[in-house]
């Protein structure tokens, strides 16, 4: 299962990013100005990204992510 995790600000993704960095398959992919942090957490592939503040930014980011990744679930950190 692949999960897209979207957060508005750096401080919201900091902890998850540090955990992802410990996975063997950790990598960073940049696309259209967004940095996608990819790794494994609890046997799930996690795609972590910062969208910026606002629902419109989140919607744009999810649309962009869907063009380059296949994922099963979207989780938005509030």
Image (tube, rainbow, N blue to C red):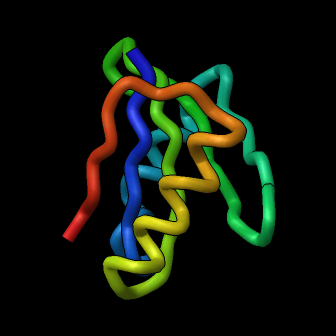
Residue at image point 38% right, 67% down: 7
Where residue 15 sits, quadrant-wise, is bottom left
Q: Is residue 67 left or right of residue 70?
A: right
Relative to 8, does residue 50 appear above or below in the rendering? above
Relative to 42, does residue 66 appear above or below in the rendering? below
Residue at image point 42% right, 66% down: 59
Relative to 46, does residue 1 appear above or below in the rendering? above
Q: Is residue 53 left or right of residue 40?
A: left
| Percent coordinates x, y for residue 50 in the rendering | 51, 68
Where residue 25 sits, quadrant-wise, is top right
Where residue 22 sits, quadrant-wise, is top right
Residue at image point 42% right, 69% down: 58
Q: Quadrant of the N terminus?
A: top left
Q: Quadrant of the C terminus?
A: bottom left
| Percent coordinates x, y for residue 75 in the rendering | 27, 47
Looking at the image, the residue that sits furthest to the left is: 78
Q: Nearer the viewer, residue 50 or 66?
A: 66
Q: Nearer the viewer, residue 40 or 49?
A: 49
Q: Nearer the viewer, residue 62 or 23?
A: 62
| Percent coordinates x, y for residue 9 in the rendering | 42, 80
Relative to 50, does residue 69 appear above or below in the rendering? above
| Percent coordinates x, y for residue 52 in the rendering | 48, 82
Residue at image point 32% right, 19% down: 42
């Amino acid at each position: 299962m692949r999960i897209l995790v979207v957060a508005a600000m750096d401080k919201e993704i900091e902890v998850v990013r540090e955990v992802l960095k410990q996975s063997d398959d950790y990598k960073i992919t940049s696309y259209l100005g967004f940095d996608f942090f990819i790794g494994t957490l609890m046997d799930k592939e996690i795609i972590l990204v910062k969208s910026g503040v606002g629902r419109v930014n989140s919607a744009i980011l999810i649309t962009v992510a869907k063009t380059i990744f296949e994922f099963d679930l979207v989780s938005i950190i509030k």
